[in-house]
Amino acid sequence: MKRCFVLAALMAGLLASAASAQTAPSMAAVVKQNYNQMKNLLTRAAAAMPDDGYSYQPTPQERSFGGWVAHVADAQMATCSGVAGARKNLNAESKTSKADLEAALKESFDACDPVFDGLTDANANDPVPGFRGAQPRLTTLFGMLSHDNECYGSMAVYLRLKGIVPPSSDRSGMPRRGAKKE
């Protein structure tokens, strides 16, 4: 009888562990993970482009690479400072040097870090100021991430046109599929 009780308790523990391992992450956790991935890609893309590449435009109708960095920094600052309660204008579009634009991008991430860190499933539906009026916090932050992804896509093309592998495609130092480990 004692063995059956111990075996039943062990099985219950294993089932509980298996059930908790299959639980999907929360919405807030997924958005935070995506934010950190986007932050990494944008920061690395900005660092990868050489100084002279910041003025690069594939056509006169397109933004320069530096213009994309400025656009991301300004949009992020407007979004995150608005969610935090006091909209701030970074005015990164007035900057042209790589150093100034990387600093502006960092400043925008510094404003966004606490906003994303503060996102929870409990406050995800709280109304916050958005560009189209009040929207749920999650909608506003997810919208910013969608915008960042679009901007990164353009930046990645510019990097490729300059012969630079974009961070999202750079697999240096990573084992290739099927490669033997030594």
Image (spheres, helix red, strand yellow):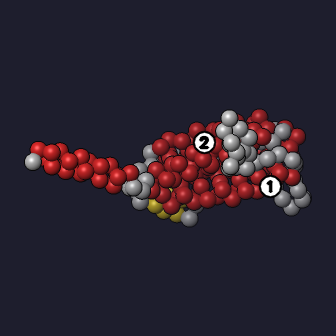
Residue drawn at x 19%, y 50% as measured from the top left: 8
The residue depicted at 81 percent of the width and 42 percent of the height is: 49
Residue sitting at the far bottom = 132
Left or right: 150 in relation to 3: right
Q: Position of residue 67 (x, y in %)?
A: 78, 50
Q: Could you classify mark 2 by the number of other residues whose Cα lies within 10 Å: few (under 14), some (14-19), or many (20 or more)?
A: many
- Residue at the (54%, 58%) spot, across then down: 142
**How many labels, in total?**
2
Residue 65 visible in this rendered orientation of the protein: yes
User: Taking 37 as reference, is 146 above or below it?
Assistant: below
Q: Is residue 26 above or below residue 3?
A: below
Residue pointed to by mark 2: 109
Q: Tag 2: residue type?
A: Phe
Q: Secondary structure at mark 2?
A: helix
- Going by the numbered disc 1, the residue's amino acid type is Val
Q: Residue at x 88, y 56 (%)?
A: 58
Is label 1 in a helix, a strand or a loop?
A: helix
Labelled disc at residue 157: 1
The answer to whether the residue labelled 2 contacts the one labelled 1, judged by CB atoms less than 8 Å apart, is: no
Q: Could you tell whether 14 is left or right of 55 in the image?
A: left
Horizontal and vertical percent position of residue 18: 35, 52
Question: Where is residue 7 drawn, in percent x and y?
Answer: 20, 48
- Residue occupying the far left of the picture: 1
**Mark 1 residue crowding within 10 angstroms, few (<14) / some (14–19) / many (20+):** some
- Give the percent coordinates (x, y) of residue 162: 87, 48
Query: Which circle's residue, 2 or 1, is located before the other in the chain?
Result: 2
Say which of 129 and 65 sits in front. Answer: 65
Residue 70 visible in the current orientation: no
Quarter of the picture containing the C terminus is top right
Q: Measure the alpha-carbon separation of dots 2 and 1.
A: 23 Å
Between label 2 and label 1, give the one nearer the viewer: 1
